[in-house]
Amino acid sequence: MPTSGASNFRLNQAIAKSGMYSRRQADLLIEAGRVSVNGKTVTDFSTTVDPLIDTVSVDGKPLDIRPFVYIAMYKPRGLVTTCADEKGRRSVMDLLPERLRHLRPVGRLDMNSEGLLIFTNDGDLTQRVTHPAHHLPKRYLVTVKGQIKDSHLNVLAGGMVLSDGPTQPARVVLIERTPAASTFEIVIREGRNRQIRRMCAQLGYQVSRLVRLAIGRLQLGEMRPGAWRYLTAHEIRQLEPD
């Protein structure tokens, strides 16, 4: 097994390159004796591997270890954010070329929501973006039916109790309000399932459009629905918690 060279990685880093685990999770797998290299169990954290030569497996299943890739997509409405859907619905993966379908979406947007979605095989970045402890802000543009009350905007901002517990305070800015519809921006630091829709529903409002505009300091910008592009090194750094 190679132990040095430009193409070598520490074992936990190589496992993270599969996109399935963070480095911390990889450490736990190594410690538990669940990792093998070229068919031999390895528990030495200092082990290095060359993904071009060595086969790294977890529980006997070989990992697909490739260089890290980072993609931003404008997810359109009507697609699910899964790699495979048991109901046969169109997935965001269908918008990526075959060579990039080893990547995984970072977090989710529900089928009727749209906006910024990140794909990567970097398990550490996925952990940083999705783990609640990092409180990475996510900004959304929300349109609801009807004329939203100032008092309800204050409730959204101050926090409210949902079925899975209280929400954290949010930043809310009213954009437009008419008798037919109201639009506002909201910044949350949580990632609960359908959180914004549930918050609005509890106050009596139906969301007609929900667009994610930013994750951390990374902006959706001028992308069009269905478009994707590679992230620059600078943009990847914008996904770091403040």
Image: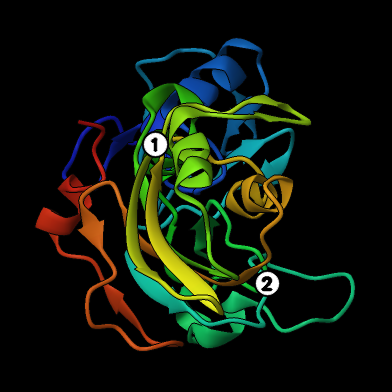
Q: Position of residue 77 (x, y in %)?
A: 59, 81
The crowding category of the residue bearing disc 1, from other C-alpha atoms within 10 Å (few below 14, some 14 to 19, many at least 20), is some
Q: Quadrant of residue 110?
A: bottom right
| Residue at left offset 41%, top offset 77% | 74
Q: Quadrant of residue 68?
A: bottom left
The crowding category of the residue bearing disc 2, from other C-alpha atoms within 10 Å (few below 14, some 14 to 19, many at least 20), is some
As drawn, 188 above or below 139: above
Quick check: 91 left or right of 63?
right
Secondary element type, mark 2: loop
Residue at the disc numbered 2:
111
Q: Position of residue 11 (x, y in %)?
A: 41, 29
Residue contact between numbered discs 1 and 2, judged by CB atoms under 8 Å: no
Nearest the camera: 1 or 229? 229
Lower sequence index among marks 1 and 2: 2
Nearest the camera: 31 or 125? 125
Q: CA distance from mark 1 to mark 2?
A: 26 Å
Instruction: Kindly identify the amino acid type of the residue bearing the numbered disc 2.
Output: Met
As drawn, 235 above or below 238: below
Nearest the camera: 125 or 136? 136
Quick check: 151 left or right of 187?
right
Q: Nearer the viewer, mark 1 or mark 2?
A: 2
Residue farthest to the right, as pictured? 87
Q: Position of residue 232 (x, y in %)?
A: 15, 64
Residue at the disc numbered 1:
124
| Residue at left offset 54%, top offset 13% | 43
| Residue at left offset 34%, top offset 69% | 72
Q: Position of residue 218 (x, y in %)?
A: 23, 57
Camera sees residue 70: yes
Instruction: Kindly identify the amino acid type of the residue bearing the numbered disc 1.
Output: Asp
Secondary element type, mark 1: helix
Q: Which mark is residue 73?
A: none
Q: Quadrant of residue 231?
A: bottom left
